[in-house]
Image (cartoon, coloured by chain):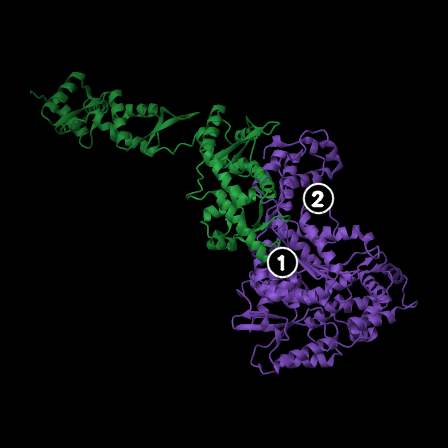
Amino acid sequence: MEHTDSGMSVELAILDALKFSPLAAADLKEHVLKRVTGLKDKPYKGSLGALIAAKRIHGLPKVGKNGKPTRTIEAYGLGAPPPSPPPAPPPRERAPKEILELLKVQALSPGDLKERLKKSVPGLAVKDLNAVLAELVESKQIYPHPKRGPKGPTKTIEKYGLEAPPPPSPSPRERAPKEILELLKPRALSLVDLKERLKESIPNLATKDLTAILAELTKTNQIYGRRKKDKNGKATTTIESYAIGGAPVDEFILPVLATWKEMRREAAAAGVRDQALVAALLDGLARDGVSVGHASPPVTQLDDSAIVLRGVRELVAREGHGALIPIRKLRGALNLPKERFDAALLGLYSSDTLILHHHDYVGNLSDAERNELVLDRHGNYYIGVALRGDQ
Amino acid sequence: MSGSNQDHALSSIANPFLGVVIQDVWQPLPLDVSSIQQNAFEQCLKGLDNVSAGKSDSLLIYGAPGAGKTHLISRFQQHLFATAKDAPDQALRCVFVAVRLQSSPTTLWQCVRQRLATDLLRQEQGISQLQRLIAHQIAAHVKEPPRKWVLAMRVLTSEGESVTEHLQSIAENLDLGRDVFVMLDHLVHRRYIFDATAWLKGDSLPEHVLSKLGVGADEGEEREEVARRVVTTLCRLAGETLPIVFCFDQLESLQRYPRDNDAFFRFGRMAADLADSDPNVLLISCVQSVFVDDLKTNMREADRDRAIRRYATLEPLTAAQSEELVRARLDSVPELKALRAKKIDPLFPIGTAYLNQLFQTSTRTPRKIIAKCSERFEELKTGTGIEVGPPEAVLESEYIERRRAALEQPPEDSTRTLTHGLPIAWFTFEKCKEFASLAALEASAADVVLRGPRGDFDVAICNERNMNSLAARFKKLLRGRSGPDVAGSVPIVLRHAALEISSGARKTREYLDELKRLGCRFIQPDAEALAALEALRSMISDARSGDLSARGETLEPTEVAHWLYIRTTPVLLPLLTQVESDA
């Protein structure tokens, strides 16, 4: 390369301008033009080219929109050009880290996430983004938050976040059974009343869902639909009211017991003893396919009722007419298993054969003391038994 | 509650179910359905027939809280009144004495004495029950119709004709004793009625009053024993034409703490003595079912045979009875009755279905059915449900009312407050878990035995107005100290702060100084502390008897006690601490 004096002074001016820091191309040219008066563009470019070739300065190319260096030199610096940086990993590889960084700040909708990634990971193909998101979800590094519809979560993803979405609040269909049981706890309700009250707590419950839930609760004996009776006392298909618990056996057996009481009185007047009457009844039931065989255990509740009633009468006879027999004492005298004893006693109370006296405050009793009492399905504890005054 | 339940037609109609607990047997019954507890009622009538025929009788009525024990007694009393024209004197079938046993078991006889005297002096058709008893006795003595002598009694005055001679013969026949005879003579002839009544009740009277009445001075005799003697003496006035009926309500209130079995033992002794006093005396005792076993177990067998000859159970309502009860209440309000006439449902507005459901699930007592129907009515009326505060609000209102009433009582009445209330408060404030057997008191001149950190100690309640009586009481306490057990605890003497010891009562002061010298502490609780104690005592007693309720639900005695503990601590704790210190 041939160097002239003026060429030398231009090169020196360039090196001097860059001695402290790189300069933008325009700034460098302005700086040199001030030092070398009358300098034309061509010799200036020639000097720049000579210095670059001698590796005394280097040009810094402008980065294009795609992140790649363009042919335009943006600035110049002293010395040989710096070694070129290692090639950037492909967008597919950069994307996971970038996604996690973005979601660290806040959960983002798929649209927002895509928009932001366009800037930080340019060139990320849509299919790559979807694959990366799927991998991150799979490895539970991020969580999709599904959009909620009126019937609960949908398939559409509302946003992605680093935290799992809160558990979805149950749908009206899911909430309804518990709510129905709560509403029926204090008292039975007609279907209209029940619907009215449910409307307040679960406004969106569909009628067909309610029907299905009531059927399910009834089937599983959690609630009982009392049927309306016609003029003759026969049950119709209309449900009059719903109540908590299964169907009360008493309701069906009460008329039977009333008839039994009447017949028993007549039988006694005719000289038929209880034992014979009960035996005949058991035979009749057995013929009807009800396994209450009198020859072998298990002993039926009917037998238990007779045993309990006899026990009460014996103790009352000992204590005096009208006396209260503590259930603890009766239980001790009869030695029946607790469940059978309790069921028999409650059955006799339901049929009005004898009366039970309740205890209003059992809170102070120990578990053992409470266990000696009889508890009905409405939570009432009974402490004593007596015969009705006319018995 | 859904607003859709509101029935605007009911908005101006009074709730017919308000007011569920009958507190007093003399209180007119707002409504009575005669089919309810018919059997127990007939047992009461049978009892009266028995004693009218000179055949001793006693009846134990038991039932659940809210089953209607007090209501039944009230019905019995009002039935006797309504059918009085069938009585031998065409005015009264029996002398009726109602005793709510809110008393210490140690002062049971004094409680009965006070109640008996009060009821004997209740006026009926111009003469008291006591005058009527005496008229019947004279009639039997001279073999004339009772009515003639009842009419004669109506015109007797202190200046006119006299029946003293007849009365004297009766006193001799019945062994009434001089003091009782003198007092009956005053009361029959309407002399010194106020003071003679006070004597009959067992009040402490000044010396000059006793002198005026013509009876002996109080010499510090055991008050409970004196009360026993007066009561059993007065019972001898009962006759076939005019028996005496004692109705003891709230037996469980005698207990100083849960499972205080001494209380039932004492009641058994007292009831047996009463039953023995005269065959024309009927005893009717009411207790909650839950206490029946304890009551029977803790009485002496011999006492039980006399105090409980028969039983009557208060039965849970039948479906028909509960319907009748609700219907009667609904029809008691004329506007509602008119409105109901247009409705198909016989139980409008409560509803047959609602009642059926209630009947199936509740414990079927009248109180519960009425309370639930009250809530239902209010709900239908306002659409918002009944405005009933929490149990605490009920307790606060009860407490304020009872404290106010106690502040109006004369200071002497605090004797019962202290003898009954002090052990209850002691237990409520967890000063001890149980008390010594009452047998320990038999030999003591004290009224109450409390248990402190160093063992049991005696408390004497000395509210005597009469300085001689007070001196005699102090002397008796001193004698107790000079006995063989002088090493025992020194009694603590309690006297209402408003009851002064007069400056002229020299002997009284001397004895008190001597007691103090021996280490006795003299404590004078003020009216505020005693009013709080009275409220606590009566509320816990009512709670034990199942007579404190909110919305038809009986309030648990332990909850009531806990509430009272917190409420009364600022006023009562200083008194209890003072009693406890150095004890």
Task: Return the disc, 1 or 2, that comes first in the chain's sequence.
Answer: 2
Chain in green colour: A
Left/right placement of residue A302 relative to residue B399 reads left
Label 1 element class: helix
Could you say which chain is coloured purple in the image?
B
Q: Residue at 73% across / 48% down in the picture?
A: B29
Residue at the spot 77% in from the left edge and 69% down from the top edge: B199
Q: Mark 1 to mark 2: distance in Å?
A: 28 Å
Is residue B282 in view?
yes
Residue drawn 81% across and 55% down? Answer: B87
Residue B92, given in percent of the width and then of the height, sits at: 81, 56
Local SS, label 2: loop
Residue indicated by mark 2:
B33
Query: Of all residues shown, which one is farthest toward the front?
Result: A271
Disc sitting over residue A52 in the figure? none
Residue B461: x, y in percent?
66, 71
| Residue type (three-letter) at the residue carrying disc 1 | Ser
Q: Is residue B405 left or right of residue A34?
A: right
In this rendering, the answer to whether A147 lies above or below B55 is above
Number of marks in the image?
Answer: 2
Tag 2: residue type?
Val
Report the chain holding disc 2. B
The residue to which callout 1 is attached is B541
Q: Name above or below for residue A382 compared with residue B439.
A: above
